[in-house]
Amino acid sequence: VDFLSSLQIVTHAVQMLRVILSGVSQGAAAAIKTYFNETAYLPCQFINSQNISLDELVVFWQNQEKLVVYELYQGKEKFDNVDPKYKNRNISFDEENWTLRLHNVEIKDQGDYQCFIHHKGPKGLVPSHKMFPPTKLLVIANFSQPEIMEGSNSSSKSYRNLTCSSIQGYPQPEEMYFLLTTENSTIKYSTTMQKSQDNITELYNVSISWSYSGFHDTTNRSIICVLCVSEMCLFSKPYDIAPVPPKTHPPPKDDILWITALSLVIVGVTVFFLVRWKRKKKQPDLSRECQ
Ligand SMILES: *[C@@H]1O[C@H](CO)[C@@H](O)[C@H](O)[C@H]1NC(C)=O
Ligand SMILES: *[C@@H]1O[C@H](CO)[C@@H](O)[C@H](O)[C@H]1NC(C)=O
Ligand SMILES: *[C@@H]1O[C@H](CO)[C@@H](O)[C@H](O)[C@H]1NC(C)=O
Ligand SMILES: *[C@@H]1O[C@H](CO)[C@@H](O)[C@H](O)[C@H]1NC(C)=O
Ligand SMILES: *[C@@H]1O[C@H](CO)[C@@H](O)[C@H](O)[C@H]1NC(C)=O
Ligand SMILES: *[C@@H]1O[C@H](CO)[C@@H](O)[C@H](O)[C@H]1NC(C)=O
Ligand SMILES: *[C@@H]1O[C@H](CO)[C@@H](O)[C@H](O)[C@H]1NC(C)=O
Ligand SMILES: *[C@@H]1O[C@H](CO)[C@@H](O)[C@H](O)[C@H]1NC(C)=O
Ligand SMILES: *[C@@H]1O[C@H](CO)[C@@H](O)[C@H](O)[C@H]1NC(C)=O
């Protein structure tokens, strides 16, 4: 157990180091993942060791374009310097943790954010904190569970149009495909993914279509649709296709004579045996009467 736990600690340390190093090597910010329309928490990472009151400070956040997102001027919200696109957003400051809460996060909010603190002293404002590296905000939206639907009107009877769709997700999926499972095998069927992006929300709707021609097979089949986004896959409910019972086809005309002849023979033979059987049945009765 000791060995295992120490191994776990080492593994953990190596992972942490890797995270730190990858951050350093790319000069990258600590990434924060937030779901679309939820709240993003952007830290300031200011350690107030001198317990300076907010009344003496100017705290503000900038985005990667150096536009002011929010400003707390001597403890009060101030909008003079805030960029117009953030003025009617729901943004608040958490005094407990010195964290900016960006509510109802949009896909457009993705990017880097930096917190600055200036100290208001007797000689005016003195920069006293600049958060580095900035926080990188990533916004994700879960795609809906993929759903397989059959096209309402198919032009041909030899195949039917199956469409699988999933809506309102972000980022773009890497892959979307059908899996056809039969008695003995599973076949992957990929087609071009149709994507459409909403102009306002920037969320994606995706779909794939398949002209499937196996509806007349006499074996069980099940189709599943798979959607993979950021190395995670979503699965549709299985679309089961029941086997078609082997049909008793109407016989071709050439065979009708044969079949009629055969039927006549069968009827004839049946009648013959029935008559014989009736006679046999009657005979014992007669013999009993004789005795
Ligand atoms: C975002 O969440 C709010 C509730 O906080 C809800 O009223 C609104 O419909 C949601 N918007 C979207 C685009 O999902
Ligand atoms: C910091 O200052 C506030 C008043 O400005 C006081 O209530 C609080 O106890 C102080 N905290 C520490 C840790 O000194
Ligand atoms: C901020 O502080 C409050 C109270 O200490 C805590 O409940 C909350 O989880 C903190 N939020 C973050 C994002 O750290
Ligand atoms: C999104 O999907 C993940 C993985 O299935 C899940 O853990 C998370 O709770 C989902 N979030 C939302 C907002 O639906
Ligand atoms: C569906 O059928 C109607 C007429 O039967 C036709 O006008 C229309 O184009 C068809 N739609 C598709 C998607 O095949
Ligand atoms: C199948 O249906 C989808 C959606 O209705 C449509 O976009 C596609 O063109 C159809 N494909 C065929 C071959 O009918
Ligand atoms: C599945 O495998 C079995 C045994 O190998 C075989 O008898 C059967 O015909 C196969 N079914 C199909 C649909 O290929
Ligand atoms: C995505 O699908 C939803 C629901 O079907 C629809 O309201 C929206 O308009 C679609 N967006 C795009 C860009 O196709
Ligand atoms: C198809 O599946 C059903 C239910 O799993 C089973 O009862 C039936 O025997 C199967 N038919 C064939 C032809 O495999």
Image (cartoon, grey):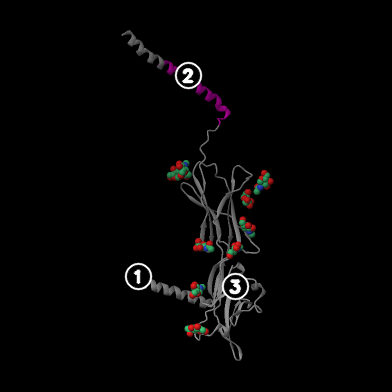
Q: Distance between the residues labelled 2 and 3?
A: 95 Å
| Residue in view at x 35 percent, y 12 percent | 285
**Disc number lying in front (2 or 3):** 3
- In this figure, which residue is indicated by the disc labeled 1? 4
The reply to whether dot 2 and dot 3 touch (C-beta < 8 Å) is no
Side (left or right) of 280 relative to 212: left
N-terminal-most mark, 2 or 1: 1
Tell us which disc is closer to us: 3 or 1.
3
- At 53% from the left and 71% from the top, the residue drawn is 32
Query: How many C-alpha atoms fall within 10 Å of the one at disc 3: few (<14), some, or many (≥20)?
Result: some
Marks 2 and 1 sit apart, C-alpha to C-alpha, by 87 Å
Mark found first going from the N terminus, 3 or 1? 1
- Whether tag 2 and tag 1 are in contact, CB under 8 A, the answer is no
Residue 268 circle label: 2
> Which quadrant does the C terminus fall into?
top left
What is the span of residues highlighted in magenta in the rendered image?
Answer: 250-276
Which amino acid, mark 3?
A: Ile
Q: What element carries label 1?
A: helix
Dot 3 corresponds to which residue? 91
The stretch drawn in magenta includes residue 264 = yes
Query: Which quadrant does ligand 8 occupy?
Result: bottom right
Please rate how many residues cluster around mark 1, counting C-alpha atoms within 10 Å: few if below 14, some from 14 to 19, many from 20: few
**Residue 261 image offset from top left, x and y in percent:** 52, 22
Kind of element beneath mark 2: helix
Residue 100 appears at what percent x and percent y? 56, 75
> Where's the N terminus, which quadrant?
bottom left
Q: Give the amino acid at mark 1.
A: Leu
